[in-house]
């Protein structure tokens, strides 16, 4: 019995260490460093189990504004929403690195939107660019899974 209890204690200790390390890396990449760029975007979509969203935005990088298109697909979402978002962009060394598929890490974004709701999301792409977004959603939706976006400079 005592051996089982020690194994559980070890598992909990390892789990706490892993969570602390992941949280530390995310905070170091987003909170304590200055963003390389900022963005603003608007997205609208219709979802019935599987659905899509599309929109546009502006990336401000090194004092210049660059328009971009946004598209996304979600599975396990039902509803009609529109969102406006602002965010900080990190690890953007070259403008071309901004293009790509951004995925939500960890458990993703889940929840219910009724009327207006505010969410925060951290996403990253294949080039290591990290985007920390704060968005306001309007409409009615239930989101049972995480999701992702494709952002492409125009």
Image (tube, helix red, strand yellow):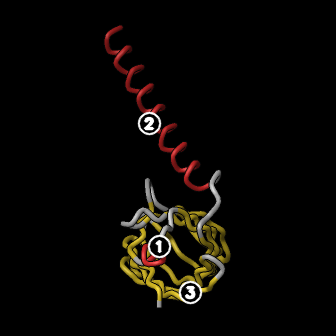
Residue 102 disc label: none
Please say if 119 is above or below 41: above
Give 46 or 71, whichever is nearer the viewer. Answer: 71
Residue 19 location (% of width, % of height): 48, 39
How far apart marks 1 and 2 lie (CA) works out to 31 Å
Q: Residues within 10 Å of mark 2 (few under 14, many from 20)?
A: few
Q: Nearer the viewer, residue 11 or 76?
A: 11
Q: State the SS at label 3.
A: strand
Residue 61 image offset from top left, x and y in percent: 59, 77
In the rendered view, does 7 fall on the left or right side of 44? left
Q: Which residue is drawn at 62% across and 76% down?
A: 62
Residue situated furthest top in the rendering = 2
Circles 1 and 3 in contact, beta carbons < 8 Å: no
What's the residue at 56%, 67% (across, down)?
89
- Residue 12 lies in quadrant: top left
Residue at the spot 54% in from the left edge and 42% down from the top edge: 24
User: Looking at the picture, how far across and down is residue 11, in whole percent?
Assistant: 38, 26
Residue that badge 2 annotates = 18
Image spot of residue 110 (x, y percent): 50, 62
Which is more foreground, mark 1 or mark 2?
A: 1
Which numbered disc covers residue 66?
A: 3
Q: Is there any visible trace of residue 18 in the rendered image? A: yes
Q: How many C-alpha atoms fall within 10 Å of the one at disc 1: few (<14), some, or many (≥20)? A: few
CA distance for labels 3 and 2? 38 Å
Which-is-in-front pick, marks 1 and 3? Answer: 1
Q: Name the residue under label 1.
A: 94
């Amino acid at each position: 019995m005592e051996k089982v209890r020690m194994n559980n204690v070890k598992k909990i200790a390892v789990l706490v260490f892993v969570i602390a390390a992941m949280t530390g890396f995310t905070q170091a990449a987003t909170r304590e460093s200055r963003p390389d760029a900022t963005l603003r975007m608007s997205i609208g979509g219709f979802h019935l189990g599987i659905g899509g969203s599309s929109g546009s935005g502006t990336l401000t990088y090194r004092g210049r504004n660059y328009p971009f298109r946004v598209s996304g697909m979600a599975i396990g979402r039902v509803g009609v929403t529109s969102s406006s978002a602002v965010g900080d962009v990190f690890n953007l060394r070259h403008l071309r690195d901004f293009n790509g598929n951004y995925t939500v890490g960890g458990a993703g974004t889940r929840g219910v939107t009724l009327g207006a709701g505010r969410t925060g999301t951290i996403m990253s792409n294949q080039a290591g660019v990290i985007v920390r977004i704060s968005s306001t959603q309007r409409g009615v939706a239930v989101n049972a899974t995480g999701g992702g976006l494709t952002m492409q400079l125009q």
